[in-house]
């Protein structure tokens, strides 16, 4: 028997809807009793982007059943709705943020690691592998693939609106309020390992001849053993970091 319920999506959740369906009540037809999660995702909104659901005016959870005639209001993070404990759909994220990015976000990952953010990435991960790692290591999934965020096991995730790596970086920092976690040049951009100072004598066999001659200060990744020094690449990285930090300061004025 065909049944119907209505949904209203607030704020940034409208990014997932066609223009003609944004900021308006949507009627959803269904059979049986699907979970609220499945109904929302059938309309295009992945569950990690949802902070709270009101079902007929009362707090609801993702796996609650949908019944005919139900009226739902669905809210993104940061909405004016006060999210007391009974409204929350997932545990509050605790500790420094840890991310995992999909295979299309290699440039974003390098930038995030340059700023010191813990970001797991391989260019051959499958969607199920990303979901499994995110669940096992309590990582936030970053993706441009809405379908990936619909995996039931993913607790925290974000769909990047921009396709430009630097804009994506600013999106992530602002969305997760990471300004206080910036720790530039503390992670290896190649493997995500921690970078520590190292004596020149310990890495001299890995250095090009001119680097041995003109540089004395070195740093090494504790995981992949890659060696870094303050050459021309360092100046370019510093310029990028200053530009990004300037964007954060500018945003705080508004």
Image (spheres, rainbow, N blue to C red):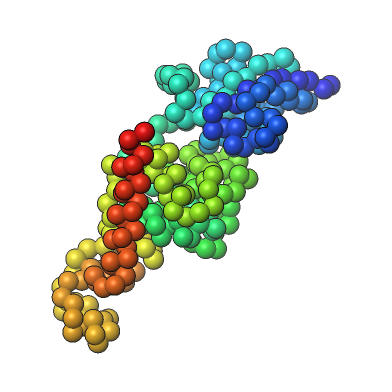
Compared with residue 95, is residue 219 higher up or lower down, i.e. above or below?
A: below
Compared with residue 115, is residue 214 higher up or lower down, i.e. above or below?
A: below
The answer to whether any part of residue 32 appears in the image is no
Where residue 64 appears, x then y in whole percent?
A: 61, 23
- Left/right of residue 124 with respect to residue 44 in the rendered view: left
- Left/right of residue 219 with respect to residue 167 in the rendered view: left
Where residue 165 appears, x then y in whole percent?
A: 47, 55
Where residue 216 appears, x then y in whole percent?
A: 15, 75
Q: Dividing the image into 4 quarters, which one contains the C terminus?
A: top left
Question: Which residue extends farthest right?
Answer: 1
Where residue 28 appears, x then y in whole percent?
A: 73, 25
Taking depth in this image into account, of 82 and 24 the one nearest to the observer is 24
Compared with residue 212, is residue 101 higher up or lower down, i.e. above or below?
A: above
- Left/right of residue 75 with respect to residue 190 in the rendered view: right
Question: Which residue extends farthest bottom?
Answer: 209
Identity of the residue drawn at 50% across and 41% down? 157
Identity of the residue drawn at 39% across and 44% down? 173
- Left/right of residue 118 with respect to residue 19 in the rendered view: left
Q: Dividing the image into 4 quarters, which one contains the N terminus?
A: top right
Asked which quadrant contains residue 61, the reply is top right
Identity of the residue drawn at 46% across and 50% down? 167
Numbered-mark total:
0
Compared with residue 58, is residue 154 higher up or lower down, i.e. above or below?
A: below
Question: Which residue extends farthest top?
Answer: 57
Taking depth in this image into account, of 94 and 104 the one nearest to the observer is 104
Identity of the residue drawn at 68% across and 16% down? 70
The answer to whether any part of residue 212 appears in the image is yes
């Amino acid at each position: 028997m065909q049944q119907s319920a209505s949904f209203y999506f607030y704020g940034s959740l409208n990014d997932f809807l066609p223009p003609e369906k944004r900021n308006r009540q949507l009627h959803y037809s269904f059979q049986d009793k699907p979970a609220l999660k499945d109904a929302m995702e059938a309309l295009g909104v992945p569950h990690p982007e949802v902070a709270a659901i009101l079902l007929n005016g009362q707090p609801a959870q993702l796996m609650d059943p949908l019944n005919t005639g139900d009226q739902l209001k669905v809210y993104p993070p940061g909405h004016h709705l006060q999210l007391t404990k009974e409204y929350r759909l997932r545990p509050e994220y605790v500790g420094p943020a840890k991310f995992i990015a999909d295979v299309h976000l290699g440039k974003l990952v390098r930038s995030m690691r340059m700023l010191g953010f813990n970001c797991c990435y391989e260019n051959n991960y499958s969607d199920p592998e990303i979901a499994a790692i995110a669940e096992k290591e309590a990582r936030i999934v970053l993706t441009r693939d809405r379908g990936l965020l619909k995996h039931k096991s993913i607790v925290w995730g974000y769909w990047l609106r921009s396709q430009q790596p630097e804009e994506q970086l600013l999106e992530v920092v602002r969305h997760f309020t990471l300004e206080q976690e910036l720790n530039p040049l503390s992670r290896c951009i190649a493997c995500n390992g921690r970078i520590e100072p190292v004596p020149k004598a310990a890495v001299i066999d890995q250095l090009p001849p001119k680097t041995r001659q003109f540089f004395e200060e070195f740093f090494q990744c504790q995981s992949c053993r890659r060696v870094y020094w303050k050459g021309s690449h360092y100046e370019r990285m510093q310029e990028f970091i200053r530009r990004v930090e300037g964007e954060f300061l500018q945003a705080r004025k508004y």
